[in-house]
Amino acid sequence: MIVNRTGEGRQRAKAAGKKLGRKGQPEEKIQLAIYLWEKRNENKYSIVDIVTSTGVPKATLYKKIKDMEKENRSNL
């Protein structure tokens, strides 16, 4: 009974345009992390260094890199 009501409430909120779930990382931080990753041969940064300096989680960085590489392959 409670599960049904909460599910209906989530559906109504979604229909009203409410964002559900946790907020993501700021896009500026992610872009900085990706930039540092692209320049890793020049600046000698490791993934751990990039994660520590930008605050972007390692999993998020790897996911964005994977998405970016997938997009680049599809554009070829």
Image: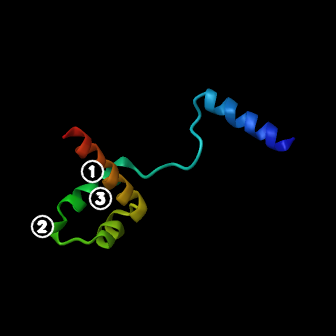
Relative to 13, 75 lies left or right: left
The secondary structure type at the circle numbered 1 is helix
Q: Position of residue 11 (x, y in %)?
A: 68, 32
User: How far, Cα to Cα, is label 1 from label 2?
Assistant: 20 Å
Q: Residue at x 23, y 45 (%)?
A: 72
Vertical placement of 25 versus 50: above or below?
above
Q: Determine which residue is flagged by label 3.
A: 33
**Which picture quadrant has residue 74?**
top left
Question: Which callout, 3 or 1, points to the residue nearer the camera?
Answer: 1
Total count of labels: 3
Residue type pointed to by label 1: Glu
Question: Which callout, 1 or 2, points to the residue nearer the camera?
Answer: 1
The secondary structure type at the circle numbered 2 is helix
User: How far, Cα to Cα, is label 2 from label 3?
Assistant: 14 Å
The secondary structure type at the circle numbered 3 is helix
Relative to 40, 9 lies left or right: right
Disc nearer the start of the sequence (2/3):
3
Residue type pointed to by label 3: Ala
Disc nearer the start of the sequence (3/1):
3
Q: Position of residue 35 (x, y in %)?
A: 23, 56
Crowding at dot 1, Cα within 10 Å, few <14 / some 14-19 / many 20+, comes out as few
Q: Determine which residue is flagged by label 2.
A: 42
Vertical placement of 74 versus 36: above or below?
above
Q: Determine which residue is flagged by label 1.
A: 69
Q: Residue at x 59, y 42 (%)?
A: 20
